[in-house]
Amino acid sequence: MNLIKINLLPYRELREMKQKKTFQGILGVGFVVGLALCAGAYMALDKAIEHQNSRNQALQEGINGLKKEIETIQTLRADKERYLARKKKVEELDNKRFDGARIVDSLNQVVPDGSYLVSLKGKGTDGNGAAEEKEYIIEGRALSDNKVALLMAALPSTGMFDLPELVEIAQTEDAQKFVLRSMLADQALLPPPSVAPQSAVPAQGAEQASAPVSASQSEAK
């Protein structure tokens, strides 16, 4: 005889409880895994940020070093420019002293007897606005107009001046006052190539100066 088995236990509640525990276990495992993943990602990002910060710091230190080197280079460049400017000024002063001596010497060679110079003034600027004496005003005294004409004719023979222009001539108590304007020749301020040609120039100027002087003496006679 078969007996009918009847389960009086609340199996549905038990099954739901079992499923609920299983689901809670899965949630717990997922939470732990997710938390571990988040912690790993956070640590990885933190290390990456720390590494990037160290790189940025190294780059910043390199940039600061380059800035200091650039400042040093700029300082050296400014010192170099100041040195070159001073050197140029010294060379210009040396050249002007040398040129002034040549100009005065050349004028002394061609001034005829019976006349003398009172003043010599240079003026003018170069293309950059710097002082560069190219035009000279020559003032002097002479016994007659003929002496002034002899001086004007002799000036180009020095090789230092172009043909002069008579600016003013007037009779004073004891002599003729004259003012000449003349430009320096283009090759006048070039230094001589050697000592021998330089010594030959005054001799040639002296010969050229002697001719006007002798002519003036013959005319005076």
Image: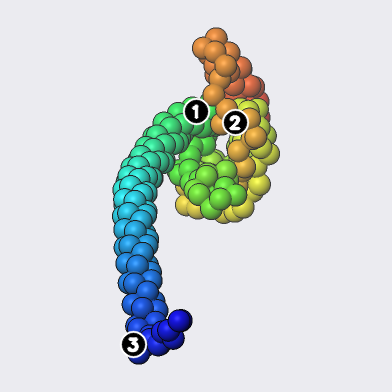
Give the spatial CA distance, label 2 vs label 1: 9 Å
Looking at the picture, does residue 146 appear above or below residue 63?
above
Q: Nearer the viewer, mark 3 or mark 1?
A: 3
Please give the name of the residue rendered at 60% of the width and 49% of the height, measured from the top-left corner.
127
Look at mark 2 in the image and give the residue it sits on: 188
Give the spatial CA distance, label 3 vs label 1: 137 Å
Q: Position of residue 148 (x, y in %)?
A: 61, 40
* Numbered mark located on residue 102 in the image: 1
Q: Earlier in the sequence, mark 2 or mark 1?
A: 1
Q: Which colouring convention does the figure follow?
A: rainbow
Q: Which of marks 3 and 2 is in front?
A: 3
Q: Position of residue 169 (x, y in %)?
A: 59, 52
Q: Which of marks 3 and 1 is nearer the N terminus?
A: 3
Q: Where is residue 141 in the image (x, y as percent from the top left)?
A: 50, 43
217 sits to left or right of 140: right
Mark 2–mark 1 CB contact (< 8 Å): yes
Q: What residue type is labelled 3?
A: Leu
Please give the name of the residue rendered at 48% of the width and 39% of the height, measured from the top-left corner.
117
Count the numbered circles shown: 3
Disc 1 crowd, CA 10 A, few/some/many (<14, 14-19, 20+): some
- Quarter that holds the N terminus: bottom left
User: Residue furthest toward the top?
Assistant: 196
The secondary element bearing badge 2 is classed as loop
Look at mark 3 in the image and give the residue it sits on: 9
Residue in front for this viewpoint, 187 or 22: 22
158 sits to left or right of 76: right
Q: What residue type is labelled 2?
A: Ala
Give the spatial CA distance, label 3 vs label 2: 133 Å
